[in-house]
Structures are given as C-alpha cells and as structure tokens.
Amino acid sequence: MRAVPELINAVNDKNVVQADGVSKVVRAGLLKILSGLMNSCDSITGLMVSGADGMALAAKLTTGFDQHRFSAMSSALLAISDSLMMETNNGKTKNVYIESEGGNVFVMHAGSSLLLTVFTDASTSLGLSLAHANNAAEEIAALNIGGYP
C-alpha cells in the first residue's frame, strides 16, 4: 500500500512544475463552467478539473486544499476504479462516490482525458448534486481540450 502515496507524491511534484503549461484560454473556459456549477448547487464546497494524468487544470477549492495533490489523488482513484470495472467486464466507471461524516466527493470522467472532482457538504442532495456535476462534466467534455494546450 506504500506505492500509492509514493505515486501521488511523484505526480504531485511533477504537476507543480507543469501547471503553468495550461493556456489561459483553456483555464478561463474551465473556470467559467466550475463557477456555474458552484452557483447552481449550494452544497458544493469545491471543484476541480484535472487531466487523466493527474495534472491540475482549474480549481475552485477552499483555502488549504492543494489542487495538485487532489488532482493526483483523483486521477489515481478514477484509474483504479476503471481497472476494477474493466476486470469485472462492467465497462468504464461513470462516477466514484466517497461519503464521509463531514462531506462527499464525486470523481467522474469529463471526456476521454479529463476528470471532474466535486466536493460537497454532508447535507447535500446527492441526486441533485450528481445531476449538476454530470451536466458540468458534459460541458467540459464539449470543450474538446484533450491535449490541454
């Protein structure tokens, strides 16, 4: 189990250096979608768009959250979930949902090479939050920024 934290740290270190490689136009488009999602659902406390490689592209997070670290963890979580689903012949993961006493996290694909991570408070309406998140993931996928210029 030691390999997962080491992998996250390695990806995190790599992304801190590469994060400025994302164009301002791409980041602005992503932030517009994230702002719309945050405004549409009061229980959402944070949002992040990452590449499937764990690179942070855009985020609306509360103070103290390290977008690069959370991007790496979200990417690893979704990749492991995809592998698990493929091994069981159930296709690609739609969403990963984590529930805790203090809040929830959704991680979902947003196109072929991007993912959306959504943080909510514990009192959220799961169906409503998930519906809004799925709509935002479709908007992000429609931007067609697979190589994030």
Image: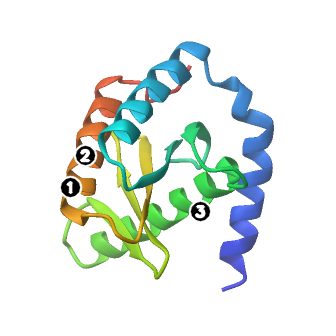
Q: As drawn, is 92 to the left or to the right of 56? A: left
* Residue type highlighted by circle 1: Leu
* Residue type highlighted by circle 3: Met
Q: As drawn, is 78 to the left or to the right of 139? A: right
Quick one: SS at disc 1?
helix
Q: Which mark is residue 73?
A: 3
Comparing 102 with 59, the one in front is 102
Quick one: SS at disc 3?
helix
Q: Which mark is residue 128?
A: 1
Mark 1 is surrounded, within 10 Å at the Cα level, by few (under 14), some (14 to 19) or many (20 or more) other residues, namely: few
Seen in the picture, residue 25 relative to 21 is either above or below; the reply is above
Mark 2 is surrounded, within 10 Å at the Cα level, by few (under 14), some (14 to 19) or many (20 or more) other residues, namely: some
Q: Quadrant of residue 79?
A: bottom left
Comparing 90 with 104, the one in front is 104
Q: Earlier in the sequence, mark 1 or mark 3?
A: 3
Q: Position of residue 65 (x, y in %)?
A: 68, 55
Q: Tell me, yes or no, whether the two marked residues, 1 and 2, touch with CB atoms within 8 Å.
A: yes
Q: Give the position of the N terminus as an image quadrant.
A: bottom right
Seen in the picture, residue 37 relative to 85 is either above or below; the reply is above
Q: Tell me, yes or no, whether the two marked residues, 3 and 2, touch with CB atoms within 8 Å.
A: no
How far is mark 1 from mark 2, CA to CA?
6 Å
Q: Residue at x 19, y 71 (%)?
A: 90
Q: Position of residue 105 (x, y in %)?
A: 43, 64
Q: Residue at x 52, y 56 (%)?
A: 75
* Residue type highlighted by circle 2: His
Seen in the picture, residue 30 relative to 91 is either above or below; the reply is above
How far is mark 1 from mark 3, CA to CA?
25 Å
Mark 3 is surrounded, within 10 Å at the Cα level, by few (under 14), some (14 to 19) or many (20 or more) other residues, namely: many
Query: In this figure, which residue is indicated by the disc labeled 2?
Result: 132
Q: Position of residue 147 (x, y in %)?
A: 50, 27
Quick one: SS at disc 2?
helix
